[in-house]
Image (cartoon, rainbow, N blue to C red):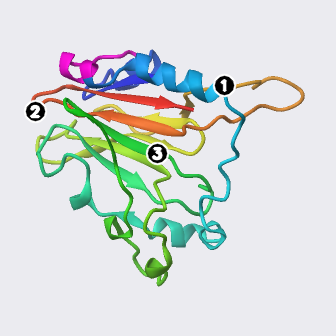
Amino acid sequence: MGSSVQRAPRLVAVLLTLLVLTTDEARAAFGLDDVAERAKKLAATAYNEPKGQVPDWLLKLTYDQWRDIRFRPEEALWRAKKLPFQVQFFHPGLYYDRTVRMNVVEPSGVKPIRFSPSQFDYGKNDFASRVPQDLGFAGLRVHAPIKTRDYYDEVIVFLGASYFRAVGKDEVFGLSARGLALDTAESWGEEFPWFREFWLVTPAANAKELTIYARS
């Protein structure tokens, strides 16, 4: 899947049409065809149940405990470069029992985004030292200055299965949407495919769009 985030009131409409906007440099490094090829290879292999990636004790956190784990804004992707978009990540635990691979696409190629407990403020929780150093992320959220030039608002969130929700300049968050939904009206019950991997294309310094690729 490829989707473009626009810093404008048309944000939600653009996302729901899954429009792909990329620069020539980014397309050369990685593109939608690469995502399709990876999905094709995955479909040819036996299904691998990803549960068990997150320690059981993290899944037993209370809602307040999980909410008290916050990504440090200074660790946001592209913050140091002062680009028009920044990305923060979510910590696994509670309802989020699977990790999602994160990658950044640069003109030079694709690089994995590494998890570290030091990227998070654990608040009043006392278990930071127990968190595996290579645990991984549960999801992501994109920030951009859609209202004022100096403040990066949260504009889109990807968290849980293939759920995402977005907001425009003069709007508030509403219902979540799904990147993929299967058997939603069948008597035997629907499936909940989940995003396994994201590729975040580095925007130009004056970019008004952000391209995100994902596979389930």
Q: Residue furthest right?
A: 187
- Report if the CB atoms under discs 1 and 3 are less than 8 Å apart: no
**Position above or below: 3 against 129:** above
Structural distance between the alpha carbons of marks 1 and 3 = 20 Å
Crowd tier of the residue under label 1, counting other residues whose Cα lies within 10 Å: few below 14, some 14–19, many 20 or above: few
Q: Return the residue at label 2.
A: 205
153 relative position to 67: left or right: left
Q: Residue at x 57, y 36 (%)?
A: 162
The amino acid marked with disc number 1 is Ala
Q: Secondary structure at mark 1?
A: loop
106 relative position to 212: left or right: left
Between residue 71 and residue 137, name the one nearer to us: 137
Name which quarter of the figure residue 102 lies in: top left
- Whether residue 36 is visible here, answered yes or no, is yes
Residue 50's x, y, as percent?
65, 49
The amino acid marked with disc number 3 is Arg
Sequence order check: which comes first, mark 2 or mark 3?
Answer: 3
Q: Return the residue at label 3.
A: 101
- Report if the CB atoms under discs 2 and 3 are less than 8 Å apart: no
Q: Which contiguous range is marked in magenta?
A: 19-28
Q: Residue at x 38, y 45 (%)?
A: 141
Q: Return the residue at label 1.
A: 44
Structural distance between the alpha carbons of marks 1 and 2 = 39 Å
Between residue 59 and residue 64, name the one nearer to us: 59
Structural distance between the alpha carbons of marks 2 and 3 = 25 Å
